[in-house]
Image (cartoon, grey):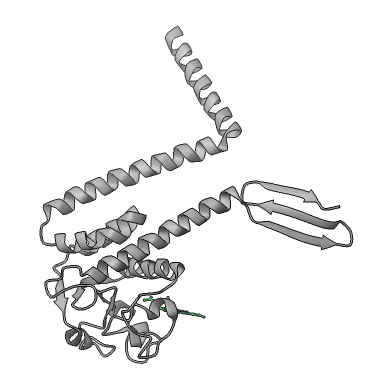
Amino acid sequence: MNRYVNLILIISIGVGMLGVGMMVWPEWVTGVMSHTSQAATAIHNLVTSLYLATTTTYQGTNSAHQGTSSAHQGTSSNKQKSSSRHRERIFTAQELQQYGSQGGTKGPYLAILGRVYNVKKGKEHYGPGGGYEFFSGRDGSRAFVTGDFTEEGLTDDISGLSSSDYIGLDEWVKFYESDYKYVGKLIGRFYDEKGEPTSQYYDAQRWISEAYRQRESENKEKKMFPPCNSEWTPESGARLWCTNRRYEVSFPVW
Ligand code: HEM
């Protein structure tokens, strides 16, 4: 009996100390939680990779896509892999054109960064009369971030965009990966006739990765040097304050 009392006592002390720890060091709690979820994501990624390694049909697509997403977000990379499990088709530009907004019974299809998706599910956007009909049957990657929906604007040439545009473009790819069915690759700027990535594919991946790296270093800088603001009111006079989300340093100017 005494052993049980001791055990309950030890557990209570342990839970109590955990509670105090959580109150005194909230950062410790978020740290532990993020490590736990990172571990869960890592295990999930490992299981998915093992599964995919056993299915040979889709290896081309996976390796082609590892550059962008696994570099930034495990979750989206998993989605890309899982969508690539279907047998993929290699399209010429003319073939893709046949899946324009009219799209026959299967389409419409659209391409972004050379990856082709069946967007039939979103017919109200991509079908005849839809607000984004012009994306169907082609790769208009650049227009996804420039909003230039003219014939010249709807191009797959993504050179010279801004850093945030490259991130925006990658987010559109993730969107199509997760919301629509991947059907294959488009021969042209990003993939060759065998569906292998071209040098421009690797350029695009590099631009996207660099954009994420730049954003990360800017975020780090913002944390170290929080932006400062100033205000003046007749009641309190001038005030200058520097803040990031967690700390605010405020001092009156006079
Ligand atoms: C660069 C500019 C833009 C691009 C490339 C763009 C692209 C798109 C695309 C591709 C879709 C269809 C998404 C899907 O498949 O579900 C969509 C939906 C939509 N967009 Fe845009 N868009 C742009 C700007 C805007 C702006 C400025 C507005 C509003 C002022 C807007 C409002 C909407 C709305 C309301 C939907 C429908 C959402 C839904 O029904 O789920 N878009 N957009």
| Residue 104 x %, y % | 21, 88
Q: Is residue 157 left or right of residue 131?
A: left
| Residue 196 x %, y % | 16, 68
Q: Is residue 6 above or below residue 133?
A: above
Which residue is found at the position 33% from the left and 55% from the top? 71
| Residue 217 x %, y % | 48, 54
Which residue is found at the position 68% from the left and 56% from the top? 228
Which residue is found at the position 23% from the left and 69% from the top? 199
72 or 213: nearer the eye? 213
Is there any visible trace of residue 230 in the rendered image? yes
Quarter-wise, where is residue 172 in the image? bottom left
Quarter-wise, where is residue 189 in the image? bottom left
In the rendered view of the protein, which quadrant contains the N terminus?
top left
Q: Could you tell me how many numbered marks the image carries?
A: 0
Which residue is found at the position 26% from the left and 65% from the top? 202
Is there any visible trace of residue 1 in the rendered image? no
